[in-house]
Amino acid sequence: MIPISDDNPVRITPYVTWAIIALCVAVFLWELSLGPHMAAASYIFGFVPATLFAGVKSPSAALGIPGSVTLFTSMFLHGGFMHIAGNMLYLWIFGNNVEEAMGHFRYLLFYLASGLAAAFTMALMDPLSTVPMIGASGAISGVLGGYVLLYPRARVTAIVPLGILFYPLRISAIWVVGLWFLLQLLNAVLSDPNQPGVAWWAHVGGFAMGLLLTPFFKTAQYRLFGDVRRGPWG
């Protein structure tokens, strides 16, 4: 199931969401410009769990960058076109409403805190790992957690692959995000955190942090499990 839009318009201009998307795209274009050295950039600026819990020297130290900084730089790196396209699609659909409910500055703090929680969760699952973690998906998982608490009844249009056909389906956000989270949790339990691949536990940790922080970061005028404004097609 691939979400492509939601029927939940906003009254603000989501500057922070747009800025994060623009920064991620700019960084990815820079990665592509490195050609065969693109993987080296991921290794240097990605977050390596062993640098936090096992005392391993961070690859970023070669450039004079403390390993702790990679907790943040890793959020803006991506490993390929599908990686960044999927992440930015989710952020584009769900980020603007969460930003409106929290305000620009608190939303930025919320996003970064979710990304940090995602990195720490992955590191706790395998503290000796030297596999670099990159991608915005941990932070975006927090955004999904915030969205489902604030707008569980918002209608989301998703594409469901049926063989060679793609069937559009409009269902409540609680089902879209709920199914997404169950898949993340299932894959996390079944995967080996020592092996390279998708950082499933990072998604779980980011989502959990989003659920935890949303009640404290939202502004007073927005209530949990609230109603949504319908667009012209609602």
Image (tube, rainbow, N blue to C red):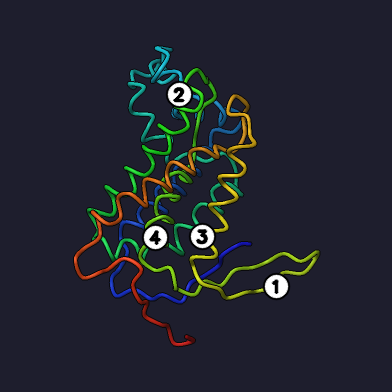
What mark, if any, has residue 95 been given in the picture?
4
- Counting residues from the start of the chain, the first of labels 1 and 4 encountered is 4
Which residue is nearer to you in this view: 97 or 222? 222
- Counting residues from the start of the chain, the first of labels 4 and 3 encountered is 4
The residue where tag 2 is placed is: 49
Q: CA distance from mark 4 to mark 2?
A: 27 Å
Name the mark nearer the viewer: 2 or 3.
Answer: 3
* Residue type beneath disc 2: Pro
* Residue type beneath disc 3: Val
* Residue type beneath disc 1: Tyr
The residue where tag 3 is placed is: 177
Left of 5 or right of it: where is 20?
left
Label 3 CA crowd tier, 10 Å (few <14, some 14–19, many 20+)? some
Left of 177 or right of it: where is 99?
left
Q: CA distance from mark 2 to mark 3?
A: 28 Å
Label 2 CA crowd tier, 10 Å (few <14, some 14–19, many 20+)? many
- Counting residues from the start of the chain, the first of labels 2 and 3 encountered is 2
Name the mark nearer the viewer: 4 or 3.
Answer: 3
Q: CA distance from mark 3 to mark 1?
A: 18 Å
Q: Which residue occupies 44% across, 87% down?
A: 232
Left of 52 or right of it: where is 132?
right
Label 1 CA crowd tier, 10 Å (few <14, some 14–19, many 20+)? few
